[in-house]
Image (cartoon, rainbow, N blue to C red):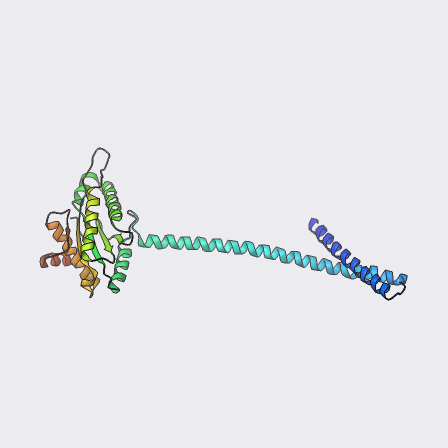
Amino acid sequence: MANLGILLTKAALITAVAEIATIAVFVLMRWFGAEAIESSEWIETLIIPLLVGMPIATYVVNQADKLRAANHQMTILNEAREQSLRQLQQAHDLISYAARHDRMTGLLNREGFMSDLSRAHEALEQSVLLIVDADFFKSINDRFGHAAGDSALTAIAKAIRRAARPIDVVGRIGGEEFGVLVRHVSVSAAAEVSERVRLEVAETVWGPDESTPVPLSVSIGGAAVRDFADSVTALMVHADACLYEAKRLGRNRIAFNATISDMARSMVTRLRPVGAQ
């Protein structure tokens, strides 16, 4: 009822304006023509615009109100659609992130790391692959339990990420094995990054509780991407073999050269789950 009253009020105002305009034009025309105005003409001038104008004005106002309401509803729907699109994009970003990242350490998972490594290999980047393995990690699990082992791995992962450069790709590629793609550098420059990683881990203070500090260390093997243009597998095998060489020499060290026996051992290991080193 209230809406009907508003509608009729608007229509009446429009009709009144039209009525006044009609009378003004009519009077001016008669005045300029010096013609007398008959009473019947006054009736026509007053009644006809009222009879015709009021229904038309009511219809026009009603349609205008409907159009405004429809536009308002469309605006609400567009805002809701945009919000839904934003939420879908956020969900997609979260799913994409989860698909590429290791839940425990926050680094790239094996699939995410290997995907980036493969792209660098296809482009034959002047980059260097590092394989970083936690030393004596099995003893941490055996002494303190797997929860403490996960905590130690997280500490090592954070240390590696701190030591690597922002452009370098860092991922967890095995149980206690990490990969670092040191991008756009020579082997000598990558060796410097490797040393920073080794020192950062060695200087990390970690323990299953505040009263039991446990030393952490890693061994690192490296291989230049361009030296193994034929396959990513060969690149991984050589970096793995260098890692074995670092382990053989006493751990907590870096190696970029591997013996034939190291490479054979690495190839065998690639065919089965990696054991604790």
Seen from the viewer's position, the closer of residues 264 and 26 is 26
Q: Position of residue 240 (x, y in %)?
A: 16, 55
Viewer-proximal residue among 25 and 10: 25
Say if 238 sits above or below 277 in the image.
Answer: below
**Residue sitting at x 31%, y 52%:** 101
Which residue shows up at 64% across the image and 57% down it? Answer: 66
The one nearer the camera, 241 or 199, is 199
Q: Residue furthest top?
A: 211
Residue 56 in picture, x, y percent from top left: 74, 61
Q: Residue at x 72, y 57 (%)?
A: 58
Question: Where residue 225 sits in the image (x, y, percent)?
Answer: 21, 61
Q: Is residue 241 left or right of residue 120?
A: left
The reply, left or right, for residue 180 in relation to residue 59 is: left
Q: Position of residue 61 (x, y in %)?
A: 69, 57
Q: Taking the image as drawn, is residue 132 in sight?
A: no
Q: Picture quarter containing residue 127?
A: bottom left
Seen at 20% across and 63% down, the residue is: 226
